[in-house]
Amino acid sequence: MVVQKQVLDNGLHAVAEPIEGKKKVFLHVGIDVGSKNEASEKKGGAHLLEHMMFRSNNWRSSDKIAEACEYSGISTNAFTSPVSTVLTFSLPPEKLDLAVELAYQAIANTAYDEKEFATEKDGPVTTELVMNERNPRNRFFIRVAIPRVYDGTPLSDAVIGTFESVRGLSIADMLDLKKRFYVPNNMIVVATGAVNPEKLFEAAQKYFAGMSSSPVEQPKIEWKFRPGVCKVEFSDLKDPKKPEQDNAFVGLVYQCPGSQEPDSAAVGLLTTMIADGFTSLMFKELRKERGIGYSPQGDYTSFLNNAIVYLGVPGLHPSRVLESIEVMDGILAKLRKGDVSSEFVEGKKFQLVSRIIDGFDSGSSRAGYWIGERFSPSFYDDEKKIEAVRALSAKQLAEVAERVFSKEPLVFVASAPGYDIKL
């Protein structure tokens, strides 16, 4: 189906992508604001503002918002990342106008109920903080790994903030964020699935055209990746009665080409080969052959073209940390040499291409794709990425692996105390 786009006079982008065979519309509204836009003492503000999206506003109480959605078959959600905030709706096609209206009201609202604000801040948002602090894996990534990887940039701070920063947030802070970033030239409205493009554009014009545009200042990301070693000890990884149940996490992080670069297709395929599924090299050599870790992991992440590959093993015994690092080093050496079978490479190509195609079949994934393209365009669209992956040769993969994985990594270890892990 043909993708249609419009830009309103105030700068709001609207995209409609009908997907044949869908019975619902997937409406997403993306705003180019996240934890990257917050002052250090206001961390968690964008996340808290996202939590307030479906609370009482100038037009409806929170109960009336819930009724308008649920009685019309509309499901809602929202999420915040370091780089953006997104409101999501899944709805019957005939309820598109109502969903766009509700999205507009959530975004344009300037009247927050003080009791609801306090309840949300001290309840669900604080509960998220508590759950992350009590989960050693989450605490490790949020408080240790991400700040070290992106040290010196606005990407280094936790999206949810800290207990101290959240405690100090006020309604005035929410309104200030909205004034600076919730403006039409800093947003996109996307509808995919069983969408009628004309109806989307009519609703976008009807509700959003009255918003005024204004200049938006985005932070400059000047990131210099620093390799090295980062080791921490968490007492809650220690079992005081059964040392054999002591726990650790280990990970290797490599700086790599971001999504705006041509080598991103090869990096994505290499990550799939290393750590995606039962046929992956890490699963075979760590879990299957050695019984290390429950689920070896690999992620390729690109924030505004600042990209890393993370390879890790959660939930292993501290005595096996060095062995795990040696195995991962050996896997990367194989890839640099091109020491993998053509059958394996072609099979993992099929796997990655299939995952990309899954995105075409998912209305929600397609909506997310268009939001990403609005704020940080990729080198490949999904169709070109499929072509690029299929065309990759073993020699090209080895060359990219050499460029990426011959560099010194950032090594992370979180371990139960009492182990002398020499890194």
Image: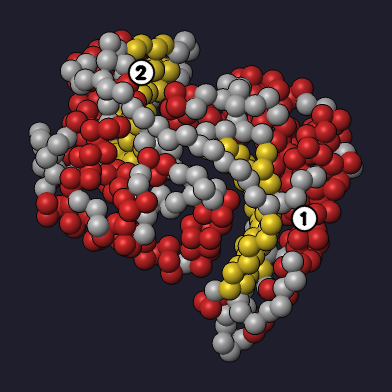
Dot 2 lies on which element?
A: strand
Q: Earlier in the sequence, mark 2 or mark 1?
A: 2
Residue 344 can be seen, yes or no: no
Viewer-nearest residue: 379 or 200:
379
Question: Looking at the picture, which amino acid does disc 1 mark?
Answer: Met
In the picture, the disc for residue 53 is none
| Spatial CA span between label 2 and label 1 | 44 Å
Residue 99 figure quarter: top left
Which residue is the site of mark 2? 13
Dot 1 lies on which element?
A: helix
Q: Residue at x 81, y 50 (%)?
A: 331
Which residue is the site of mark 1? 328
Q: Position of residue 416 (x, y in %)?
A: 60, 76
Mark 2 Cα-neighbour bin, 10 Å: few <14, some 14–19, many ≥20: many
Residue 39 can be seen, yes or no: yes
Compared with 180, 272 (above or below) is below
Residue 103 figure quarter: top left
Dots 2, 1 in contact, CB < 8 A: no
Q: Position of residue 366 (x, y in %)?
A: 47, 27
Q: Residue at x 44, y 23 (%)?
A: 374
Q: Determine whether, in the image, residue 361 is placed left or right of residue 328.
A: left
Question: Looking at the picture, which amino acid does disc 2 mark?
Answer: His
Q: Residue at x 27, y 22 (%)?
A: 214
Q: Position of residue 212 (x, y in %)?
A: 21, 20
Mark 1 Cα-neighbour bin, 10 Å: few <14, some 14–19, many ≥20: many
Q: Position of residue 5 (x, y in %)?
A: 39, 12
Q: Determine whether, in the image, residue 331 is placed left or right of residue 275.
A: right
